[in-house]
Image (cartoon, grey):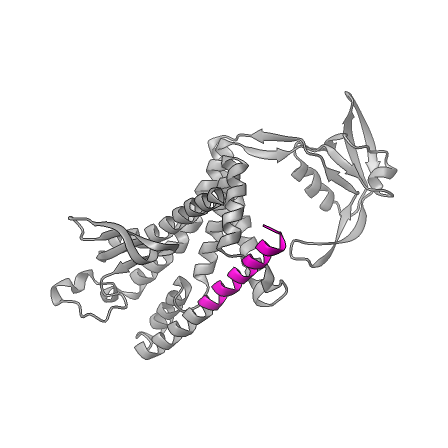
């Protein structure tokens, strides 16, 4: 329990810091005075004030978020005339949009850097060694056996299980010539994939060409050079973002059950397991959570960054902001929605916790 709690605090602390750092740096860039930079909500636990900028940096009691409080940002207290040039509300709509968008952008940037670092450190890759052969499958009919290593499919070299799997799925069912190594001998077999109905990660039925093989347990840690790591970091960031957007839409349209939503207990459990599996796995996990935080914050829900951006876009089109009473009512609705979502996620966490017998 202490182990998972520690890593949950580390993961969430870093990602919250990165998010709020985006808001902070863009605010400073546009000449907005930052009054408070807080990691956590609620009562102040520790803090200090910068004598140069006057910003108070603090740790607060509830480590499930953070905030940057800027001069003139939703504050009932009037701003003195001499301080107006440094107030958030005195800036144009585009600088305000940049400040708000910087938080999610920094989360995406962190994901890219974390994934790049993971590939520099070394990523565990499953080797293309067959771990299982399904009965009455194309693989069995072709004479493939457990322990065989596939080295080529037609002219495509196969060094990783991921390449083996993707090449078979892209075959459209055409015959494949596989070069196989078995006990030091190499030979070729022809395998004809069969279209099988299976399910994707969302539980939706799909038809794919399959040959009836499963991976073994042999893995190899691969370290990449700087440029290749940057390329793979970008590719994985893009695929994680696309997957998160798709998952969010399927949750909204109820294709995926809301019971799949996870909260802090699930994050803590996954953070501990990722840390146990090594540095690159922890970096991949942090990148995934960072992308999820970015997408969540960009949803056009009042009180989230996306809600503020939505209001600013309306202001940019109208030339004037919405009435304060309208924004306040929308923010109350958004806060209620967010609290209900958090309560639902916690309920799911507790259900998983007790059903697993922990």
Residue 156 in picture, x, y percent from top left: 70, 34
**Predominant secondary structure in magenta?**
helix
56 lies above or below 127: below
Q: Which residues are magenta?
A: 338-358
The image quarter in which residue 327 lies: bottom left
In percent of width and height, residue 226 lies at: 46, 32
Residue 232 at least partly seen: no
Q: Position of residue 160 (x, y in %)?
A: 65, 34
Q: How many marks?
A: 0
Q: In this orientation, which residue lies closer to the viewer: 27 or 131?
A: 131
Which residue is found at the position 77% from the left and 48% from the top? 209
Specify whether residue 284 is painted magenta.
Answer: no
Q: Quadrant of residue 168?
A: top right
Q: Position of residue 182 (x, y in %)?
A: 78, 25
Front-lying residue, 220 or 195: 220
The answer to whether residue 34 is left or right of residue 18 is left
Viewer-closest of 297 and 344: 344
Of the pair 20 and 261, the residue shown nearer to us: 261
- Residue at left 25%, top 60%? 70
Residue 329 left/right relative to 347: left
Is 348 in the magenta? yes
* As drawn, 144 above or below 54: above
Which residue: 23% across, 71% down? Answer: 76
Instruction: Using residue 293 as the reference point, say whether residue 45 is left or right of it.
Output: left
Residue 216: in sight, yes or no? yes
As drawn, the residue found furthest toward the top would be 184
In the rendered image, the vertical position of residue 335 relative to residue 266, given as above or below: below
Q: Residue at x 72, y 32 (%)?
A: 129
């Amino acid at each position: 329990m202490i182990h998972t709690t520690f890593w949950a605090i580390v993961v969430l602390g870093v990602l919250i810091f990165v998010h709020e750092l985006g808001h902070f740096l863009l605010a400073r860039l546009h000449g907005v005075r930052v009054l408070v930079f807080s990691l956590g909500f609620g009562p102040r636990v520790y803090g200090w004030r910068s004598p140069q900028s006057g910003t108070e940096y603090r740790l607060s009691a509830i480590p499930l978020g953070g905030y940057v409080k800027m001069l003139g940002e939703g504050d009932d207290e009037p701003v003195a005339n001499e301080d107006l040039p440094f107030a958030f509300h005195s800036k144009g709509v585009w600088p305000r949009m940049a400040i708000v968008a910087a938080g999610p952008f920094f989360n995406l940037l962190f994901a890219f850097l974390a994934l790049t670092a993971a590939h520099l450190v070394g990523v565990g890759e499953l080797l293309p060694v067959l771990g299982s052969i399904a009965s009455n499958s194309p693989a069995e009919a072709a004479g493939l056996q457990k322990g065989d290593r596939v080295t080529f499919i037609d002219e495509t070299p196969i060094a990783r299980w991921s390449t083996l799997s993707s090449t078979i799925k892209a075959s459209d069912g055409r015959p494949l010539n596989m070069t196989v190594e078995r006990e030091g001998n190499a030979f070729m077999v022809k395998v004809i994939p069969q279209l099988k109905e299976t399910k994707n990660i969302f539980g939706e039925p799909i038809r794919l060409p399959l040959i009836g093989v499963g991976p073994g347990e042999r893995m190899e840690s691969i370290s990449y050079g700087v440029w290749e790591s940057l390329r793979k970091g970008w590719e994985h960031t893009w695929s994680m973002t696309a997957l998160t957007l798709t998952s969010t839409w399927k949750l909204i349209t109820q294709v995926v059950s809301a019971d799949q939503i996870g909260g802090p207990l699930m994050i803590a459990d996954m953070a501990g397991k990722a840390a146990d599996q090594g540095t690159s796995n922890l970096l991949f996990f942090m990148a995934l959570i960072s992308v999820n935080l970015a997408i969540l914050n960009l949803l056009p829900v009042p009180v989230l960054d996306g809600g503020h951006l939505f209001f600013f876009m309306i202001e940019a089109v109208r030339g004037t902001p919405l009435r304060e009473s309208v924004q306040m009512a929308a923010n109350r609705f958004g806060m209620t929605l967010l609290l209900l979502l958090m309560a639902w996620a916690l309920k799911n966490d507790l259900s998983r916790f007790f059903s697993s017998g922990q």
